[in-house]
Amino acid sequence: MHVAALQNHLAPLLVPCSRVYAACMAVRRRFWESPISPAFRPSRPVVSVGNIAWGGTGKTPLVDWLLHWAGTRGLNPAVLTRGYGAKPPTVPFLVGSQHTAEEAGDEPLMLARRNPYAAVLVDPVRRRAGRWAEHELRPHFYLLDDGMQHLAVRRDLDLVVLRPDDVLDQWGRVLPAGSWREGASALKSATAFFVKSSPEVFEALAPVLEERLAPYGVPVFSFWLRPSGLLRVGGNEQRPHFDGAPYVLVSGVGGPGQVGETATRYFGYAPVRHRVFPDHHPYGPDDVRSLAQEGAQLVCTPKDAVKLERFAGLDLWTFDLQTVFGPAIGTAAPFPQWWDERWARLARERAGTS
């Protein structure tokens, strides 16, 4: 039985537990946000990118866009990330392009390679990583990856990423009765909301988005991932497409359905198979042997590519992805313009208090 269906079936038992859990999380949030908490406040601005639910929502593409934005302006940011599944030899661990996904985690390694001017720091204790960066790096600002519930580091801006399901049947459904990690009161901390969806889906969601999110008084932006081409994993070759040849899609991410939709839209036809692995899957020799026997072109996500590149002889391609912003609610400005203005205001505010 699917997890959501099981939760619905057991709702009479789970909902009381959810209320207790949500109340405990609300108390926790009030403590860490209070002036007496030991939360760490760096000397430079902190931008949190997080979500209220478990699972993939598109946080990493948003972090990647912000890092690219920083690079175009000569800013050197530091990313504070847990590094899910990482086994760093020491902490904090400053991720370099030469490191492996086993050491750094798949998403931190991908971010570090795509943004070499950024300091990507893996450490489950992000206060510790932040203090180290304050002393050793002096970055222009910090990006708190998956930071909505990581309250031990104070943030200036909270960018909250939602799934379409979060404003539909999952709205307000806290663990264990749903997928939310906190109750809806936690959304009051948001500086802006983001929904990873196509413009068409976002427009269809607009009435419920306005009903659910308008009370928070902040803008709601849509975004999606658009491939601009294909890159050979482990090489430098690029190509625009497969000339109509069949392909097998490989993904170990939180939202495999969206990966399938993206691939089908880009190529103009669906994969012959979609090999779906668990999120953050540690690919091994048996997986690679199985993939090598598919008999069609293999294409994977960039997150999977950093783990599969170490296997020689696997003819594998990955998408060169761009984060694209679409329609918004609550503002007439597209997100890049809104962000420029919000960042300028934050910089002035922090300069005035330093």
Image (tube, rainbow, N blue to C red):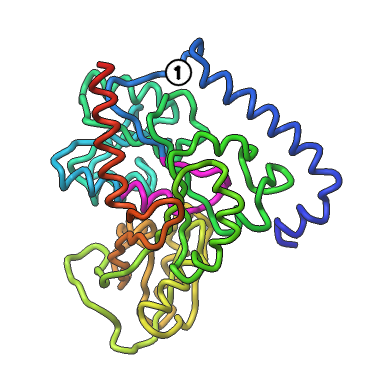
Where does residue 304 sit, x and y in percent of width and height?
A: 39, 59
Q: Secondary structure at mark 1?
A: loop
Question: Does 265 sit above or below residue 56?
Answer: below
Q: Is residue 61 magenta?
A: yes
Label 1: which residue?
39
At 63% from the left and 28% from the top, the residue drawn is 26
The answer to whether any part of residue 85 appears in the image is: no
Front residue of 273 and 264:
264
Write the start and end of the magenta stretch as one range.
Answer: 49-64
At 54% from the left and 48% from the top, the residue drawn is 214
At 44% from the left and 58% from the top, the residue drawn is 284
Outermost residue to the right: 12
Front residue of 267 and 192:
192
Where does residue 207 sit, x and y in percent of width and height?
A: 58, 61
Question: Does 27 sit above or below residue 170?
Answer: above
Q: Toward which corner of the image does residue 121 lie, by quadrant?
A: top left
Where does residue 311 sit, x and y in percent of width and height?
A: 33, 61
Amino acid residing under circle 1: Ala
Outermost residue to the top: 36
Front residue of 36 and 4:
36
Where does residue 240 sit, x and y in percent of width and height?
A: 24, 78
